[in-house]
Image (spheres, rainbow, N blue to C red):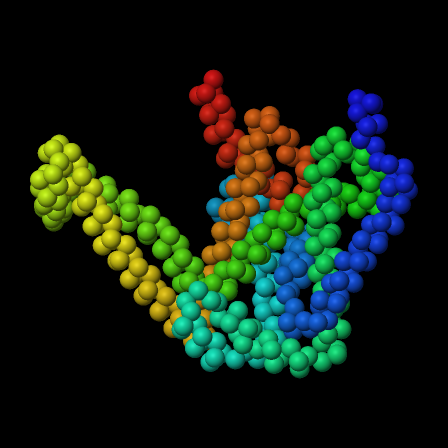
């Protein structure tokens, strides 16, 4: 083992100059970020990293001060839950509230500081291209003229904001890397000096406690913001078209071969259509083969018909989404409803990721709990909830498989 660690040790020159190299790399990234931000200006800069940072800061403050005072804990159904599950409900609700608050604050800031959109031109453009989001079109419409009108103060603030965004992204990458390498031999090999660095030792407990929590907050915030831009009608249309076409194809080829079509009088036309095609094909092929091919031909006809119906319904949803986008109040309400729905979806995605990590640990594949502190609010709450509801199912599965 000692030989392995010796082979994995950092070169002396890199160990001695690691701090200087890291500072130089961050300085270069910060300089590039400042230039990009200054060119775009504050009002044209993406604020995603700031929204995430605001969500995380509010989550940390509320979780620290208000976790036990959460009104949800007083609800009868929640009060009956296991204490670990109760704690998770409180933490998750605080995380979702923090994200909503951050999105709302930056939404107000955007209304105040972002240039006024050329909404009429954007809507006209949207009518011609169904796939473009109205915000994207509006920004494209103004990019040329507004870019030349950005003042010096706007550019300076934009540069500083871009630097903050870059630092936040680098910090997230660094913290994630520290967590991952901590459970590998590199922790006591070539990266041992990194973990023994004075600054890393000071922040390590915080990093291990909150990094995965903050990453899950980032996932939920990103999904929620995407929902606001898409709108609940537009999002439903996308899901409906995808599932609708799959269902149309499957149902079209199932019905000609099923007993349902044969036993239902209102579906008798399917049998007649299959027989018609079978008779045509039977003039050139054996009857046994013609019968099957006749049903396949009937399935093709039904598939075309069902897909046309799905496309028409999708067109109606598209027209409805456009009508909503033309009315600011309806567009706002549509965006808020979509944000709430997509936040829930983001929470489900995070829960599925955590469940996968939990399952890997349960079956002894990977000790995923070593990636976070036992006092980590969100991750610990997820694992406590899995202990209560998922673990019995996994144990039953294990006993069934022997």
In the rendered structure, the answer to whether residue 200 lies left or right of residue 372 reads right
Whether 237 is drawn above or below 135: the answer is above
Whether 114 is drawn above or below 4: the answer is below
What quarter of the picture does the N terminus occupy? top right
In the rendered structure, the answer to whether residue 277 lies left or right of residue 68 reads left
Across and down, in percent, residue 67 comes to 64, 50
Q: Residue at position x 64%, y 64% from top?
A: 47
Q: Residue at position x 47%, y 63% from top?
A: 230
Q: In terms of depth relative to the viewer, which is nearer, 186 or 206? A: 186
Across and down, in percent, residue 194 comes to 82, 40
Q: In terms of depth relative to the viewer, which is nearer, 89 or 110? A: 110
In the rendered structure, the answer to whether residue 208 lies left or right of residue 216 reads right
Q: In terms of depth relative to the viewer, which is nearer, 320 or 186? A: 186
Q: Quadrant of residue 383?
A: top right
Whether 307 is drawn above or below 179: the answer is below
Q: How many marks?
A: 0
**Can residue 274 be seen in the rendering of this structure?**
yes
Please, which residue is most extreme toward the front here? 284
Q: Residue at position x 46%, y 20% from top?
A: 401
Across and down, in percent, residue 218 comes to 61, 53
Please, which residue is most extreme toward the top here? 402
Q: Residue at position x 76%, y 33% from top?
A: 186
**Can residue 335 be seen in the rendering of this structure?**
no
Across and down, in percent, residue 192 comes to 82, 35
């Amino acid at each position: 083992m000692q030989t392995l660690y010796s082979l994995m040790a950092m070169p002396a020159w890199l160990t001695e100059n690691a701090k200087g190299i890291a500072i130089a790399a961050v300085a270069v990234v910060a300089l590039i970020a400042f230039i990009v931000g200054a060119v775009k200006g504050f009002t044209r800069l993406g604020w995603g990293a700031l929204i995430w940072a605001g969500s995380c800061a509010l989550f940390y403050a509320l979780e620290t001060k208000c976790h036990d005072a959460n009104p949800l804990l007083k609800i009868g159904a929640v009060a009956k839950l296991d204490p670990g599950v109760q704690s998770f409900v409180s933490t998750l609700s605080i995380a979702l509230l923090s994200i909503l608050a951050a999105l709302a604050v930056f939404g107000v800031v955007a209304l105040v500081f972002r240039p006024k959109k050329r909404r009429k031109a954007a809507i006209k453009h949207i009518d011609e291209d169904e796939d473009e989001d109205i915000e994207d079109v509006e920004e494209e419409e103004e990019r040329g003229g507004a870019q030349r009108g950005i003042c010096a103060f706007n550019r300076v603030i934009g540069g500083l904001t871009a630097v903050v965004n870059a630092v936040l992204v680098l910090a997230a990458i660094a913290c994630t890397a520290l967590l991952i390498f901590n459970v590998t031999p590199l922790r006591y090999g070539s990266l041992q000096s990194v973990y023994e660095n004075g600054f890393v030792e000071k922040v390590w407990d915080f990093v291990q406690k909150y990094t995965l929590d903050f990453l899950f907050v980032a996932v939920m915030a990103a999904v929620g913001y995407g929902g606001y831009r898409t709108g609940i009608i537009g999002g439903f249309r996308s899901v409906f078209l995808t599932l609708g076409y799959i269902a149309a194809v499957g149902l079209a080829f199932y019905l000609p071969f099923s007993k349902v079509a044969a036993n239902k009088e209102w579906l008798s036309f399917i049998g007649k259509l299959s027989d018609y095609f079978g008779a045509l094909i039977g003039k050139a092929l054996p009857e046994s083969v013609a019968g099957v091919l006749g049903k396949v031909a009937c399935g093709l006809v039904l598939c075309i018909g069902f897909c046309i119906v799905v496309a028409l319904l999708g067109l109606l949803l598209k027209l409805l989404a456009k009508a909503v986008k033309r009315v600011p109040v309806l567009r706002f309400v549509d965006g808020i409803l979509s944000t709430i729905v997509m936040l829930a979806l983001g929470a489900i995605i995070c829960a599925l990721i955590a469940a996968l990590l939990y399952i890997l640990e349960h079956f002894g594949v990977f000790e995923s709990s070593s990636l976070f502190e036992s006092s980590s609010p969100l991750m610990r709450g997820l694992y406590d909830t899995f202990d209560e509801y998922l673990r019995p199912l996994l144990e039953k599965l294990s006993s069934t498989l022997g």
